[in-house]
Amino acid sequence: MNTRLLAPAGLVAATLLLASCGGGGSAGDGGGGGIGGTGGTMRISMTDAPACGYDEVNVTIERIRVHQSGTAVDGDSGWHDIVVSPARRIDLLTLTNGALEELGETALPAGRYTQMRLVLADNGSLTPPPNSVVPTGGAEVALTTPSAQQSGLKLNTAIDVPEGKVADVVLDFDACKSVVKRGNSGQYNLKPVIQVIPLLADAGLRITGYVDPSIATGASVSVQSGGVPVKATVPDLTGRFVLYPVPAGTYDLVMTANGRVNAVVTGVPVVAATPTALNDAAHALLPPASAGRAVVGTLTPPTASLRALQTLTAGPSFEAAWAPVDAVSGAFALGLPIGAPVRATYVAPPAALAFTTDTAVAGRYRLDAASGGVHKTVDIDTSAAVPPVTLTFP
């Protein structure tokens, strides 16, 4: 699974390790190299990016474990637990547009914590399953969660807990990239893509805006840095969207929608003190219409990931789509607009964004596949039919 993520200021990119991680130690175990005594508190919440092709993605969280050592294993002292009691079943798809689900908090010795584990409930024979998906138009199916019950899903972090203060942390769970279909078996695997974001303020660290309500269903909005999404969401039925939390910095905002060209707004600032408004409802985003092109292929091994990048004439490059890859066959399929993308430079409202059309890159994309830290790319042009793409990693 590709977990390569850029880390703008304030963002900790979580590298998720799916191998068994161990989970010994009881709640509140002391030690771990803290700076003397119980000096601070860690409080954890969860949010979600958009999901593709699902009506529900449910996970049941039993506890979150943290440690100051990134290499701590079963039986080591120094583990501290946030116990979710009773275990909480959360539909991740309800956590969009800045919604946060608080999971709990615990007192900790002051210092830096570099390992976190998310422990999920065991499905067993329970109905409904604690962890499940509901494919769009289909029935609920249990979600297989390797290593998540006994040892927990391991996240590498760098969270500072100051003496006498509360460190707020948000787990940003990307449901679309985390659920993998297993061939024609009707089963699904959880291969989580999670970012761990220190939350430094409540007033700012967010972008608000509007897309036209006529295209709100099927639209997605993300902020990206260097072509890597930092936060994504879907607008509500009125077209309003909220991207939160977003670490302070400057980003490219990317909007994609069914039957529309890609739209990019560069130089969007995010600060801690105040929200950033992209536009108002009177100036909602409505990119030109465009036909789409299907792109299909196969990745070997099927654990590889694939996304489509588009590069504007004067930059930047941005992620235009992410392709779900079948966990058995390695088959993937995605749809990309043929029409030329539009771009604008950010200006604060009430000034209107001035979009221009980048005709030179119409239909041109780069497919970026990744496996075990190795990347392979293929350039394609959707102005004509694209032959099936086959990429094999050693």
Image (cartoon, helix red, strand yellow):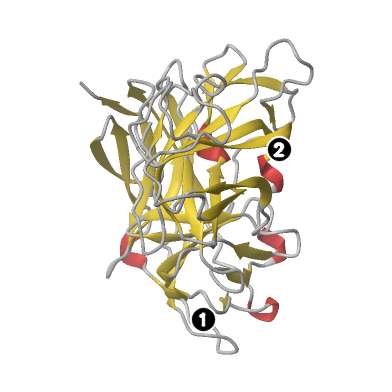
Instruction: Look at the numbered disc 1 and give the secondary structure of its residue.
Output: loop
Can residue 385 be seen here? The reply is no
Whole-angstrom CA distance, mark 2 to mark 1, is 37 Å
Instruction: Look at the numbered disc 2 and give the secondary structure of its residue.
Output: strand
Assign the N terminus to one quadrant of the image.
Answer: top left
Q: Quadrant of residue 120?
A: top right
State the image coordinates of residue 190 (x, y, percent, origin top left): 54, 26
State the image coordinates of residue 188 (x, y, percent, origin top left): 58, 21
Which residue is at the front of the view, 194 or 105? 105
Assign the C terminus to one quadrant of the image.
Answer: top left
Q: Residue at x 68, y 12 (%)?
A: 124
Question: In this view, which residue lies farthest toward the front?
Answer: 37
Can residue 67 be seen here? The reply is yes
Q: Which residue is mark 2?
A: 90
Question: In this view, which residue lies farthest toward the bottom?
Answer: 351
Q: Which residue is mark 1?
A: 353
Mark 2 nearby-residue class (10 Å; few <14, some 14–19, many ≥20):
some
State the image coordinates of residue 286 (x, y, percent, origin top left): 60, 68
Q: Image height check: is 379 above or below 349?
A: above
Q: Residue at x 35, y 38 (%)?
A: 69
Q: Residue at x 51, y 34 (%)?
A: 29
Q: Image height check: is 363 above or below 371?
A: below
Which residue is at the front of the view, 79 or 374? 79
Q: Image height check: is 158 above or below 175?
A: below
Which residue is at the front of the view, 44 or 39? 39
Callout 2, which amino acid?
Answer: Ile
